[in-house]
Image: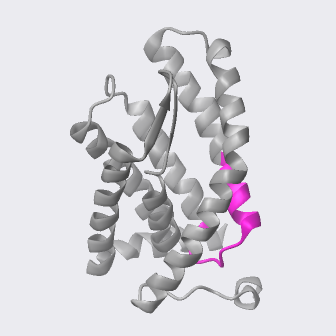
Amino acid sequence: MQKLKELYQHSLKEFCNTKTVVLCGILAALAIVLSMVASIQFGPYIRIGFSGLPNRIVEFLFGPVVGCLFGGALDFLKYIVKPDGPFFFGFTFNAMLSGLIYGTLLYRRPVSIKRIVIAEFIVKLVINCGLNTLWLSMLYGKGFIALIGPRIIKNIIMLPIDSIILLFTLTYAGKIAAKFGFFTIKTRSEECA
């Protein structure tokens, strides 16, 4: 529990760094552009896109606190730039909770497929299939059971695809970030100590 507390405190301190704020702004702009041009809509309830990759980079580089706040602010900004249905705070909450989950599992740790798959699985199960389906059911008056089937299938299909994409993205983002002095990744021996 102490390590988790330290992780969150260290992530909170990331806000004091000007580089962090600037990179978050750049990645937010990238996420907004990706949400407009790199999303595929399958009916009214299923969308596949790449606009979440900048979020994952922020959570990986700056941790759960920055990731949570970045996710919430970005969800609100995306809605202002391109409204897609009514604004509903549940989706903003989901973006923030995703930031906490990914940030807690990925922050300052070596990139590993195991850790990425665990994070992806938790988010897809709890947030994508659970909470998102609940919010859609509440918003549009559709039955939860009627919506969840296609969403489960989509998330099962996307789990390995998203995991591989995230593995490559974080591997290269980590190398580039280290080159520019954002952080150094712990080695496996340092992590176990």
Q: Residue furthest left?
A: 81
The answer to if 110 sits in the magenta stretch is: yes
- Looking at the rendered image, the quarter that the C terminus falls into is bottom right
- The answer to whether residue 22 is visible is yes
* Side (left or right) of 172 relative to 157: left
Residue 84 pos. (x, y %): 33, 29
Total marks in image: 0
Bounds of the magenta span?
A: 106-122
- Residue at horizontal 62 percent and vertical 18 percent from the top: 147
- Residue at horizontal 39 percent and vertical 75 percent from the top: 13
> Above or below — where is 51 with respect to 80?
below
- Residue at horizontal 53 percent and vertical 49 percent from the top: 98
* Dominant secondary structure, magenta: helix
Residue 76 pos. (x, y %): 30, 42
Residue 23 pos. (x, y %): 32, 72
- Residue at horizontal 56 percent and vertical 23 percent from the top: 134
The answer to if 187 sits in the magenta stretch is: no
Q: Which is more toward the observer, 47 or 64?
A: 47
Q: Which is more toward the observer, 151 or 22?
A: 151
> Above or below — where is 75 with respect to 166?
above
- Looking at the rendered image, the quarter that the N terminus falls into is bottom right
Residue 189 pos. (x, y %): 76, 90
> Above or below — where is 174 with respect to 51?
below
- The answer to whether residue 125 is visible is no
